[in-house]
Image (cartoon, rainbow, N blue to C red):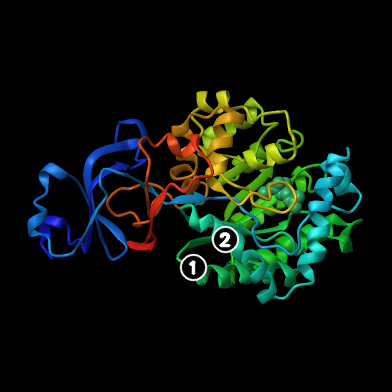
Amino acid sequence: MNSAFGGSEKIWINAQIATMNPQVKTPYGLLKDHALGVKNGTIALITPMQDLDINDFQGEIIDAQQQYLTPGLVDSHTHLIYGGQRSAEFSKRLHGATYEEISRAGGGILSTVNATRALGEDELAEQARPRLEALIHEGVTTVEIKSGYGLTFEDELKILRTAKKLAADFPIRLRTTLLAAHAVPPEYINDSDRYIELVCKEMIPLVATEGLADAVDVFCEKIAFSPAQSELVFAAAQKAGLGIKVHAEQLSNSHGAELAAGYSAWSVDHLEYLDEAGIKAMKKSGTVATLLPGAFYFLGETKKPPVELLRQYQVPMALASDLNPGSSPLASLLLMLNMGCVLFGLTPEEALQGATRHGAMALGSEKQIGTLSVGRNADMVLWNIEDPAQLAYQFGTDLLVQRIFAGDISHA
Ligand code: NIG
Ligand code: FE
């Protein structure tokens, strides 16, 4: 290969590259009329078309025809491995019951726990497969999957193993998170401290040694775990060298975000009730604010996350699907871009950043994914659009021309 092409094996030419790289000082980090070369699954070259003598190139040439290349989408918060579905609970809510009431009556998360415990790894994977396929088909190239519907040692491990097995069948990067502290299991209903002890002393060390999870998450909320219990989980995760995430300030302000920021959490998620003290702490620790407009929409919430204040403090905002059976059964990250703008007032650029670079940061993976620059993984999408804002503006039409995973065209 000619060294003028950075050793590239394959080059996309005539592309509008929305790099999402903050060092490129244009909206979306846009580089007009550029070429992008890949080698061994990573980006080897980004250069203006006018500087490229493509006649000398001996590898594969793909003409982007002035369409837009963006980083592959990053869905940094999902619970996509679970058994069953909860449309009956949806009906109950539409007859007046609240999400919290259903949860306190033993429905909600615990009903999915029963359905998930009843399934083996293969059945669980089969049920989750269409959800993962839906994300992949719209351009997601990295997905985070949490456990959290097992709530026993074996069932939590089963979910993490299922996630790994399922993802291995697809061209997708997977990050897994242990969310054993998602709800108090029925077996520990009067002794949640003892369950937290099991999570901290046994589950976290084991998933760390076996490489089953990259991070640990907790649902810090009145209907789940207290700030003091959450802190024990953060400390155990830190000790095990795992990333830290938290479901916080979704239904009330428990100050879980501030607490997690004190442990240098990768992200704090939901955040409708987040206050300024929490935001200050996140700014200090470099923690990402992950907004989940699907859950806000699906639960009919009215309190919005403090987007303007997050902007003022320049806290990076990620957007994710929260794909789960109870609060966001919505297998579309592009829909979240639209909702992030319409419901939360994000700009289309902030929305795309949330599903690329900031999503990558929320997974501690910004050095590998989330932007298009030399050395990053060549995970990209080529879109049939006239403006990157169209990704947040339009929903339901198939805008994807090519999905590229590690330099290979996986869908076209
Ligand atoms: O992210 N907030 C807690 N966990 C999920 C909902 C889980 C469920 O209702 O099954 C969420 O919204
Ligand atoms: Fe969630």
**Crowding near pointer 2: few (<14 within 10 Å), some, many (20+)?**
many
Q: Nearer the viewer, residue 270 or 320?
A: 320
Quarter of the image with the N terminus in it: bottom left
* Residue at the image position 48 percent from the left and 29 percent from the top: 347
**Visible residue check, residue 280:** yes
The amino acid type found where label 2 is placed reads Leu
Give the residue number, with chain letter if any, for mark 1. Answer: 170
**Crowding near pointer 1: few (<14 within 10 Å), some, many (20+)?**
some
The percent position of residue 353, horizontal first and vertical second, equals 45, 39
The percent position of residue 226, horizontal first and vertical second, equals 79, 45
Quarter of the image with the C terminus in it: bottom left
* Residue at the image position 20 percent from the left and 61 percent from the top: 8
Left or right: residue 142 versus residue 335 is left
Left or right: residue 5 versus residue 110 is left
Give the residue number, with chain letter if any, for mark 2. Answer: 132
Name above or below for residue 378 compared with residue 334: below
Q: Nearer the viewer, residue 253 or 111?
A: 111
Marks 1/2 in contact by CB < 8 Å: the verdict is yes
The percent position of residue 306, horizontal first and vertical second, equals 62, 27
* Residue at the image position 66 percent from the left and 76 percent from the top: 122
**Visible residue check, residue 262:** no
For the residue with label 1, is its CB less than 8 Å from the closest atom of ligand 2? Answer: no
The amino acid type found where label 1 is placed reads Phe
The percent position of residue 367, horizontal first and vertical second, equals 39, 51
